Amino acid sequence: MTTEPSAAARAPFFGFERPIVFRGPEFRPSPGEPFAYRYYDKDRLVLGKRMEDQLRFAVCYWHSFVGAGLDPFGDATFQRPWHGPGDPMAQALHKADVAFDLFRLVDTPFFTFHDRDVAPEGATLAESNRNLRQVAKVFERHIADTGVRLLWGTANLFSHRRYMAGGATNPDPEVFTHAAAQVKNALDVTHGLGGANYVLWGGREGYETLLNTDLKRELAQLGRFLNLVVEHKHKIGFKGPILLEPKPAEPTKHQYDYDVATVYGFLQAHGLEKEVKVNIEQNHALLAGHTFEHEIALAHALGIFGSIDMNRGDELLGWDTDQFPNNLQHVAMALYEVLRAGGLTTGGLNFDAKLRRQSIDPNDLVWSHATAMDLCARGLLVAEAMVRDGALQRHVDTRYAGWDTPHGQSILRGEVSLAALAAQAEANPVEPQPRSAGQERLEHLVSSYL
């Protein structure tokens, strides 16, 4: 068994020595300060809240510290010190030290994890649970020392061989039981660490072919599983929301949490629409054939908006590329919908994004997160300008003004029948005339804010 060197004896993992600070739009890089925030001024007030509190940035553990640069055609390229042979728990503690150093350098207020990201799988479930609780004690010290908080935790119910046919939707009730025990431990640890939310992502909760699938049974199993999680949340006094993360496919051919609309229908079917919200990812929205802002706006309209996984999908590729955001207009439009939804409450902007496999320098982790944070801050300022100016909202209000008249309101209140509406239409000699929606003018208006 290889022994990891102590934290004090290790060489620094990152080349950056000092945390990145705000310098303003006029900043120019120098050898002594290669990067500074031009837009991310965390104490700046944006619509009455500090910018840090509007954005609530989080670094994800899995891509940043677990990912090894693998792809279907090539082996690992990153070669982190905690990858490869060694004492798994010592490596986990080394990884935790490096993680909180990254949080310090980019000055992010939150982080996120899967249970198996932060602690190794043991020979038994009991050992695995102990491993997670041991690392959680280390996290408690780091959290107390740094003030960085846990945005959300979750359980990995998709990587291990036992979950090849799903966790909650597995045809074997023993696998369901194992998954339930793993989620209980992860939720307990999340609660103990003061996590703001708890997430469930059903990567294997779906099917490859209907030839071997009982669809009705699997949906019932998934509903029972989610109810169990909600019941346990209330039992332990966890105050944060349970979040489902929609995705249409990958790794399964068809996932049951396809998109926001599908999730809402599922929640309604199982009486959970008041208990569970959604964590929306840009790349997943793209794979489902939607824009990011569509999914955010729909979740708001349905009352289930919770949090965001901020990343970018490649529109030319049909898989989850999980790139860091770099498109200002896309980010601004998403954040405009977030602000219209009342902003983030317990949720945040979690960078579910990974380095490209050729980005092997540890400093690339700093550059990628810091530049993404600065872009999102700039996008937030654009979204703020759109809200304050109000031109987009005025256009929408004018377009639907007829529904605020006594006639429109009587329809919505159910005070008139279909027959009464038909009689009114036949008695009206004036043909209703369409009005221009002005899409091109509005698209130009959005560009002017950039």
Image (cartoon, rainbow, N blue to C red):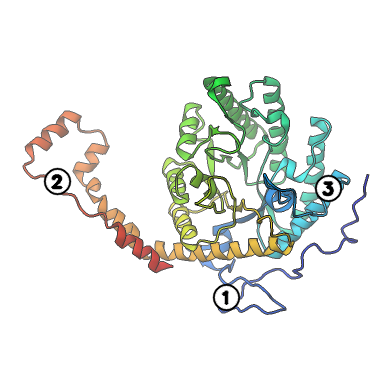
Q: Which residue is at the front of the view, 315 or 201?
A: 315
- Residue 181 is at least partly visible in this image: no
Give the residue at mark 2. 432
Nearer-N-terminus badge (2/1): 1
- Picture disc at residue 84: 3
Residues packed near mark 2 inside 10 Å, few (<14), some (14 to 19) or many (20 plus): few
Q: Could you tell me residue 31's position as x and y percent?
A: 71, 79
Tell me the SS state at disc 3: loop
The amino acid pointed to by label 1 is Gly
**Cα gap from disc 3 to disc 1, whole angstroms:** 42 Å
Residue shown at the point (45%, 44%) measured from the top left:
289
Nearer-N-terminus badge (2/3): 3
Q: Is residue 394 above or below residue 285?
A: below
- Picture disc at residue 294: none
The amino acid pointed to by label 2 is Pro
Q: Is residue 221 above or below residue 393?
A: above
Name the side, left or right, on which 384 lies relative to 149: left
Is the C-beta separation of discs 3 and 1 under 8 Å? no
Q: Could you tell me residue 335's position as x and y percent?
A: 48, 57
**Cα gap from disc 2 to disc 1, whole angstroms:** 53 Å
- Residue 14 is at least partly visible in this image: yes
Between circles 3 and 1, the one closer to the viewer is 3
Residues packed near mark 1 inside 10 Å, few (<14), some (14 to 19) or many (20 plus): few
Give the residue at mark 1. 24
Q: Could you tell me residue 414's position as x and y percent?
A: 25, 33
Tell me the SS state at disc 1: loop
Q: Quadrant of the C terminus?
A: bottom left
Q: Quadrant of the N terminus?
A: top right
